[in-house]
């Protein structure tokens, strides 16, 4: 069968699945999986597992041992961390194409005009927290492979599909744990697609790095009426943040990249002080002040370099002021990732995107970090991209939504790419 007929059959099959896609999308959005702390992961994993089993996958649940939770999910309040992994063997054990999406969402917060967990469908959009980031990606990865079957084809290689927790807090108990335990591994997994919401007409080939760090300045308590008898840790933090704003931030603005980070405003190094805490009572001089920093790195920078820049400012202050005492600790750190653009995986998604969209997808680099860091940097798999439905600028917003048309586009592109990468044959009458 020629390629045009294959594409036509596949597009018809994907379109015929629209009602099922929307229904499953509503079901998964309705499970509130806010992280922190990590609610209802088991229920969401089982919903995904049931759908995978319905579509013929072998299903396994991978739970982080309770004794590892303080290490891998320190803000998870001891709640269970569980991933679901489905495997659909082909006639050939290899190649293996692994799709992965995260099922956790950031807290909904206030200010919504629609209920965040009712899965409302209106004007061609599915609304809800996680509809865009990134439960629609999980929906698309599952129905893409089902579309191949409904179109009358069988994939020859093996497909894996996972839904994981904790990406919003670093992913260490999710994809990080799957990589650590060898479920995703070089020599075993050939291609990985992270189905994040980077727009259905773009292929994401990497991400900026992140250095989330906590800084503590130390002092000595005293009564607020006698501040000179104490050492005010907040005053020490103010000195440090002054240097950060006046010296470090201007330098960072000059560190730019020509790589296609989106949005364009993120094609530079950035630093944001996002949390400050000090003091316990209005009439007590605080002996400790903590600040948290979100530092983003462009390719060419490293986590170690970013932390050292803050440490150097602290050393300067310490040399000037013997009462300046500090600590720095890492919260979540990842060096930038960037994969080649000439691999079979990238070429398959470019060609499939062109067939579906009528134009070649753009390359993009994510402004944040994501689960690609584990696959590329720890598993050593360079054939790993991010591709999924949903507009990046809607992630974490009030009234978050995904256009149903975008999910269908992603289903078609993923399906065609899977056929290209794994090979396929036409089903004969009576085959399933």
Image: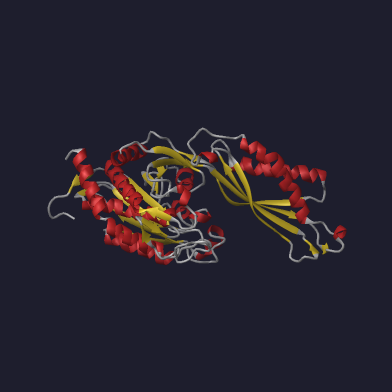
Q: Position of residue 312 (x, y in %)?
A: 71, 41
Question: Seen from this angle, which residue lies furthest left?
Answer: 429
Q: Position of residue 245 (x, y in %)?
A: 69, 43
Is the residue 39 above or below the residue 166 in the image? below
Instruction: Answer yes or no: is residue 94 visible.
Output: no
Please give the count of numbered marks on the rendered protein: 0
Q: How is the image coloured?
A: secondary structure
Q: Left or right: 107 with respect to 100? A: right
As rendered, which of 402 and 355 lies closer to the eye? 402
As rendered, which of 383 and 137 lies closer to the eye? 137
Q: Quadrant of the C terminus?
A: bottom left
Q: Position of residue 153 (x, y in %)?
A: 20, 48
Question: Residue 296's image quarter?
Answer: top right
Q: Left or right: 28 with respect to 237? A: left
Q: Quadrant of the N terminus?
A: top left
Instruction: Answer yes or no: is residue 341 visible.
Output: yes
Q: Left or right: 166 with respect to 156? A: right
Q: Position of residue 104 (x, y in %)?
A: 46, 59
Is the residue 248 above or below the residue 120 in the image? above
């Amino acid at each position: 069968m020629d390629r045009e007929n294959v594409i036509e059959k596949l597009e018809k099959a994907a379109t015929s699945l629209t009602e099922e896609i929307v229904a499953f999308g509503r079901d998964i959005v309705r499970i509130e999986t806010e992280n922190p702390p990590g609610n209802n992961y088991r229920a969401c994993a089982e919903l995904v597992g049931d759908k995978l089993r319905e579509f013929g996958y072998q299903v396994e649940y991978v739970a982080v041992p309770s004794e590892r939770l303080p290490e891998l999910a320190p803000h998870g309040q001891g709640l269970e961390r569980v991933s679901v992994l489905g495997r659909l063997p082909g006639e050939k054990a290899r190649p293996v194409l692994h799709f992965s999406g995260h099922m956790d969402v950031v807290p909904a917060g206030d200010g919504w005009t629609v209920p965040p967990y009712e899965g409302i469908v209106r004007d061609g959009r599915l609304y809800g927290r996680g509809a865009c980031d990134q439960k629609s990606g999980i929906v698309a990865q599952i129905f893409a492979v089902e579309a191949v079957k409904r179109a009358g084809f069988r994939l020859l290689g093996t497909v894996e599909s996972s839904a994981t927790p904790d990406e919003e807090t670093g992913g260490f108990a999710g994809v990080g744990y799957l990589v650590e335990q060898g479920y995703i591994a070089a020599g075993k997994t050939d291609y990985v697609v992270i189905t994040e919401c980077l727009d259905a007409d773009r292929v994401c080939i990497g991400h900026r790095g992140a250095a989330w760090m906590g800084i503590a300045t130390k002092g000595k308590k005293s009564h607020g009426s006698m501040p000179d008898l104490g050492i005010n840790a907040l005053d020490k933090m103010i000195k440090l943040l002054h240097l950060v704003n006046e010296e470090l931030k201007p330098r960072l603005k000059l560190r730019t990249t020509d790589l296609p980070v989106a949005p364009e405003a993120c094609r530079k190094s950035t630093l944001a002080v996002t949390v400050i805490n000090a003091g316990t009572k209005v009439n007590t001089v605080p002996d400790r002040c903590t600040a948290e920093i979100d530092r983003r790195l462009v390719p060419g920078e490293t986590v170690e370099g970013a932390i050292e820049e803050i440490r150097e400012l602290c050393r300067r202050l310490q040399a000037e002021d013997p009462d300046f005492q500090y600590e720095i600790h890492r919260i979540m750190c990842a060096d930038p990732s960037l994969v080649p653009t000439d691999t079979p995986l990238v070429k398959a998604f470019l060609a499939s995107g062109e067939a579906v969209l009528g134009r070649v997808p753009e390359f993009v680099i994510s402004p944040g970090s994501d689960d690609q860091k584990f696959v590329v940097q720890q598993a050593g798999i360079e054939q790993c991209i991010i591709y999924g439905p949903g507009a990046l600028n809607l992630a974490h917003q009030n009234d978050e939504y995904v256009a149903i048309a975008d999910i269908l586009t992603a289903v078609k592109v993923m399906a065609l790419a899977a056929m290209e990468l794994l090979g396929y044959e036409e089903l004969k009458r009576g085959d399933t």
